[in-house]
Image (cartoon, helix red, strand yellow):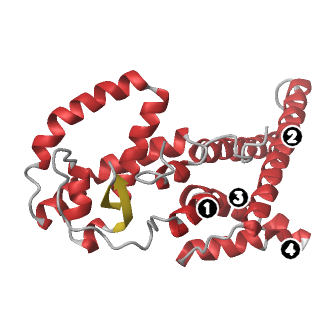
Amino acid sequence: MNFYAGRVSPVIYVVSSTILVLNIGFATVYFTHTLFSKLGDMYSVRAFQYSLFCLALLYITKLKDSLNEFSIKMRKETVQYKGFLLLLFKISVRYSKMPRLWAICFFPVLLIVQMVLILFGQRPDSFIRLFLDTSSFTYSRIPNPPPEMLKGDEHYLCSVAARGHTKVVKPVRAGLRHGKRIPVNRQLLVANAFEHLLEEYMPRMHHFIRYIYDKYGYPLSRHIRTKWSADLVYLFMKPLEWFFLFILYTVDQKPENRIQIQYSELRK
């Protein structure tokens, strides 16, 4: 099974690859430890050595194939990474051009580079990025709407995005909510994507959680009337945002697609 070919989520892929690497390490340690041993039933030891050796070669082959596929995808990628991710991106792109000896020596390092990029370098598909940049609504360029609550439909995460200090809550673009423009930040997109995931796969649980949220969320939102209170709620919600993000990256094959389409015309 090729783990990378869009068949599993980023977290599942990284966990699976890590298990393969640990098994290769275990096989190497056992093989070197028992290679010249004279103790015990040597036939069973040799048979186990041979089995582990074959499994290790199989795991290495699978990891190598996945790394090759990932390198090809990176060369076709149009996203501009920044900072440390940009450095890792360049290393990954140049992998296929390395001399064979260098590629073998740096294979473990390249596996780590691949896992980091898969976990922290996820980007939405080019179609979604193009739509958000060039659609008639021009989500990425439209000026942020004024910081006011939507009458009759308060939502305290929206309040955070609208009322908090820009340097803290970091609004990323404008979005649509019931036909009206609202500013959205990363936290709001992630929370709504998590709700979207529950609605799709666990509708009964979503209905219950939504009932609780509607019952207690509105009273809370009424107390968010200043930028400082919005900042505090944003910081308080951070652990929950990370939890939502972990679930999305564990369940969804392309979590950033689901996240970025929230509060846009692509959301169904």
Whichever of callouts 1 and 2 sits on the residue coming sooner in the sequence is 2
Q: In this view, does 267 lie to the left or right of 21?
A: left
Residue at image x 82%, y 48%?
60
Q: Does label 4 or label 1 sit earlier along the sequence?
A: 4
Q: What residue type is labelled 2?
A: Phe
> For the residue carrying disc 3, how many other residues have a C-alpha within 10 Å: few (<14), some (14-19), or many (20+)?
many
**First in residue order: circle 4 vs circle 2:** 2
Of the two numbered discs 4 and 2 in the rendering, the one whose residue sits closer to the viewer:
4
Circle 2 or circle 3, nearest the eye = 3
Q: Mark 1 points at which residue?
A: 117
Q: Which residue is drawn at 36% across and 47% down?
A: 191
Q: Residue 53 carries which label?
A: 2
User: Image quadrant for the N terminus?
Assistant: top right
Label 4 to label 2, Cα distance in Å? 28 Å
Residue 123 seen in this snapshot: no
At mark 1, the secondary structure is: helix
List the residue tagged with mark 3.
111
- Disc 4 to disc 3: CB gap under 8 Å: no
Q: Which amino acid does label 1 sit on?
A: Leu
Say which residue appears at 19% left-offset and 47% top-offset. 154
Using the numbered discs, state the Cα–Cα distance from disc 2 to disc 3 in whole angstroms: 20 Å
- The residue singled out by tag 4 in the image is 97
Q: Is residue 120 left or right of residue 231?
A: right
- Secondary structure of residue under mark 3: helix
Q: Position of residue 106 (x, y in %)?
A: 77, 67
x and y percentages locating residue 245 in the rendered image: 43, 48
Q: Helix, strand, or loop for circle 2? A: helix
Q: Position of residue 266 (x, y in %)?
A: 51, 50
Neighbour tally class for label 4: few under 14, some 14-19, many 20 plus, Cα within 10 Å: few
Disc 3 from disc 1: Cα separation: 10 Å
- Ranked by sequence position, the earlier of labels 3 and 1 is 3
Residue type, numbered disc 4: Lys
